[in-house]
Image: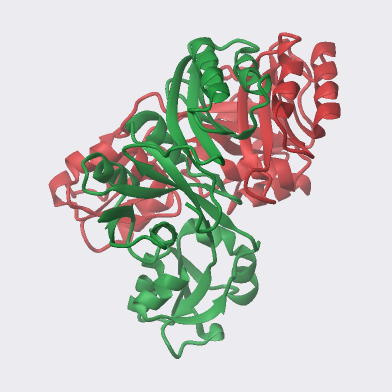
Chain colours: A red, B green
Amino acid sequence: MQTIAYLGPPGTFSEEAALAYAAGRAGVNFLPLASMPAVVTAIETDAATVGVLPIENVLEGSVTNTLDLLIHETNLRIAGEIVVPIRQYLVARAGITLPEIKVLYAHPQSLGQCRKFVERCLPGVATVASLSNSAAPTEALADERPAAAISTLRAAELTGSHVLAREIADTQGNVTRFIVLAQHDAPPTGDDKTSFCFGFREDRAGTLVGALHELAADNINMTKLESRPAKAALGQYIFLVDINGHREDARVAAALKRIESRAGFLKLFGSYPCWKSRSF
Amino acid sequence: MQTIAYLGPPGTFSEEAALAYAAGRAGVNFLPLASMPAVVTAIETDAATVGVLPIENVLEGSVTNTLDLLIHETNLRIAGEIVVPIRQYLVARAGITLPEIKVLYAHPQSLGQCRKFVERCLPGVATVASLSNSAAPTEALADERPAAAISTLRAAELTGSHVLAREIADTQGNVTRFIVLAQHDAPPTGDDKTSFCFGFREDRAGTLVGALHELAADNINMTKLESRPAKAALGQYIFLVDINGHREDARVAAALKRIESRAGFLKLFGSYPCWKSRSF
C-alpha cells in the first residue's frame, strides 16, 4: 500500500499530479497536506511513501519553494517526474451568467495566466486573491454577491460549481512539471535524468564555466540550468542542473565527481526515468 | 524635471527604491502605477522619465515578471540599479495589543518571510492574503475585528497604523535589488555592470558552456546567471547574464559579439553603474 502526499486541498493541480502518479498502481492512498514542507516531512517520517511537488511551469518558470526545499531542507531523493497540463476554468454557482459577475476569486498566479480573458470578458470586475486554485471556487460560492472563480476542473466538480468558460488561459500548451520525492531515487531504465545542485566557495570568472565544461566535454546533455540565491549575500548563487543519464552511468558518475571537486559543494537530488505519459 | 514611475501604491518597497533614486536630485516627481507593465509603458510613452522595478531578492531570488518584461516586452534599457533593505513591521490600529489580534493581513511573500514570528507570536491567528505590503495595513484598519498587518514602515506611516513589532522577518539582511529603466542606458563610470540575455536555436550539449566560455576566456566576471523558460516548450530556456564592465569596453563588446554569433539570439539590456549606496 503506497501513500502519496501532495499539496492539498483536493482539487489542486498537485492532486492531478498525484492521480497521474497513481494511475495503474493498485492500493494507493492519498494524503493532502497544508504546505510543501509538510509533504517533505511526511515522506521523511514514513507518513507517506512518496510525495509530489511542482518544480517548473512552462510559462512561469521554476517553483522556487521546491528548489529551496531540495537545496536546504531535505535529503530525500527525486524518484520520478510527472508533467501535468494546466487548464483553467471560469466557474460560478449555477444560474450566474458572465455579464452578472461582480467579483472574481483567483490565485494570483492563475489570474496572471488568464489576464486576457479577464480583461476582455470580465472588464471592471473586482478581483480577490485566493490562497489556492481549489480555495477560489469555495470562496466564490460563499460570497453573497454574484461571484466567479478561476478554478481547476476537478475543484469545480468537488465544489459543485458550474463551468462558465473552459481553458481560459492566455496561452495554450501550459504544463507544469512535478517531481516525485521518496527515500530513494530510481534504478536505471535506459532513459533517465539526473538532478543535482552545486555551489562555489569563491566567486571568480570561469568557475561556473569550468564546472559545466565537465559535462560538455563528455557530451552529457544539460536539460536545465537554474540559479538560486545562496541566501548569504546578493551575488552568491547555487546552481541547479538536470542532465540526461543515470548517476550509475560511469560517464555521469565521473563528471559529477569532477564537478564536485571543482565546486567544493555538490548535492545529488537523484536519478529517475524521463516522463512519458503514463510510462513510469 | 524627472518623473519616476514605480509599482504603487505609495508605501511599497518599490516606493522606497524610487525615493532612494530621487535622493540628491532636485525637482523630482513620483508616479505610482498599478502594475509593472504600466511602469514600462509609462517610460516608453514619456509619461515618465525613468521607472524602478524589483529584479532580485536575496532570499526569494529573481522577480520573474521583471525578467520576462525585459526579455519579451520592451526595448527600454537598464540605466541603474538600487539595493533596498527589506524590513517588515507588524502594525495595527492604535490600542490593539499583540494577544488581542485575531486576523493578520499580509502579502503572501511577506507572510512567508515572517513565518517564525507569526508562528511564535501570533499562533492560531487567521491569515488573509493582501495584494501588496501597502494594501495590508489599509485592509487591517478597515476590519472590524482586532486585525494586524505585515507592512512596510512607510505604509504604516501613510495609513496612521501603530507599530507593534519591528523587523519581524526570519532572516536579517534581506535586501531587494531594483533596476532603473529608461530610454537609454548609462555612460561608463569605471565601475559598471552590463546585463543581457541570449538563447539558442538548438538544444545540444555544450552550447551554453561555449557561450559562457567567451566571457571566462577574457576574464570577464559573471555576477549573475539566471534561466527563464522560452515559453515554447518545457526544456527551452533563455539565459540572463550580468557581467562586470561596460558594453563600450572593447573586451566586453567583443565577447558580446562572439556570444551572439554562437547563440543566434542576444538582447542587450544595458550598461549602468554598480550600486553603492547613494552613489549614482
Residue B80 is at least partly visible in this image = yes
Q: Pinpoint residue A158: horizontal percent, then vertical percent.
A: 41, 46
Q: Position of residue B240 (x, y in %)?
A: 52, 30
Q: How many marks?
A: 0
Q: Residue at x 57, y 73 (%)?
A: B124
Identity of the residue drawn at 38% across and 59% down: B22
Q: Is residue A72 left or right of residue A150?
A: right
Q: Nearer the viewer, residue B130 or B200?
A: B200
Residue A237 versus residue B59 in the image, above or below? above
Quarter-wise, where is residue A275 in the image? top right
> Residue at horizontal 68%, vertical 19%?
B217
Quarter of the image where one finds residue B37: top left
The residue lying toward the viewer, choosing from A274 and A10, is: A274
Residue B47 pos. (x, y %): 21, 48
The quadrant of the picture occupied by the N terminus of chain A is top right
Question: Viewer-proximal residue, A87 or B68?
Answer: B68
- Is residue A1 among what the camera can see? no
Residue furthest to the bottom = B95
The quarter of the picture where the C terminus of chain A appears is top right
Looking at this view, name the residue that lies furthest to the left. Answer: A99
Residue B168 in the figure: left or right of residue A44:
left
- Residue B242 percent across, percent down from the top left: 55, 34
Residue at 47%, 35% in the rendered image: B271
